[in-house]
Image (spheres, rainbow, N blue to C red):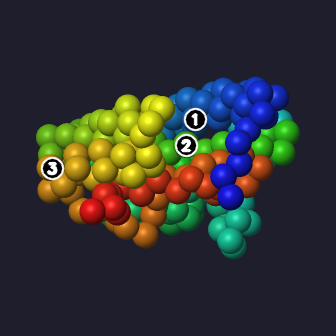
Amino acid sequence: MLSIKSLDEIVIMKEAGKILSFIRKELLKFLKVGISTFDLDMIALDLMKKNGVISAFKGYQGFGGYICISVNEAVVHGLPSKTRILKLGDIVTLDIGIKHKGYCVDSAWTYSLGSVSNKIKQFIENTKKSLFLGIEQVKPGNKISDISRAIGKFGNKHNYGIIEIFSGHGIGKKLHEEPYIFNFDFVS
């Protein structure tokens, strides 16, 4: 069931979002060639502790990391590893989720380490564009399917494969809440 947040809940979630943004920006200082994804995870844990929040991911459905770090072909939910050392040309997605005063927030951002092909640069830029095209559909009178359609249409236009088993989602007291927002037009 869709959970409508009160003004007080929204204030707490905005605080959490600011903390998450700070943690991500600090973590980016360490996102460099030669670091292991495990070390990035430990730095993220330290930043969470220093900011009075906990990981929303650790232990969730058995997940072993504090953040998800997906490298190159890993689509989502990459598990940090001592043996996964980042190298020049890697594409890295940092997915960070935290709990603050009983509420979850999460955010995923993709970065390239060093120089990558124009095709990869364009792909990263286009995925961001598709997100904003979806956000533009959030307005009175529109449906969730309008968001999904905008994202999927843009992806199809650029011949990108759409992973249909994952989606965007609501968030609040639980990490995954309704509504679920797919990245494809599921209504014909």
Residue at 25 percent across and 40 percent down: it is 126
- Is 82 situated left or right of 85 in this image? right
Locate the C terminus and report the quarter of the image it occupies: bottom left
Residue 162: x percent and y percent?
A: 29, 62
Residue neighbourhood size for the residue with mark 3, other residues' Cα within 10 Å, grouped as few (<14), some (14–19), many (≥20): few
Residue 158's tag is 3
Q: Name the residue that disc number 2 marks.
A: 107
Q: Distance of mark 3 from mark 2, alpha carbons? A: 24 Å
Q: Nearer the viewer, residue 125 or 47?
A: 125
Residue at 66 percent across and 42 percent down: it is 105
Disc 1 on helix, strand or loop? helix
Q: Quick check: 183 above or below 46?
A: below
- Is 6 situated left or right of 164 in this image? right
Residue 4: x percent and y percent?
A: 70, 42
Label 1 or label 2, whichever comes before in sequence order: 1
Callout 3 amino acid:
His
Q: Quick check: 95 above or below 49?
A: below
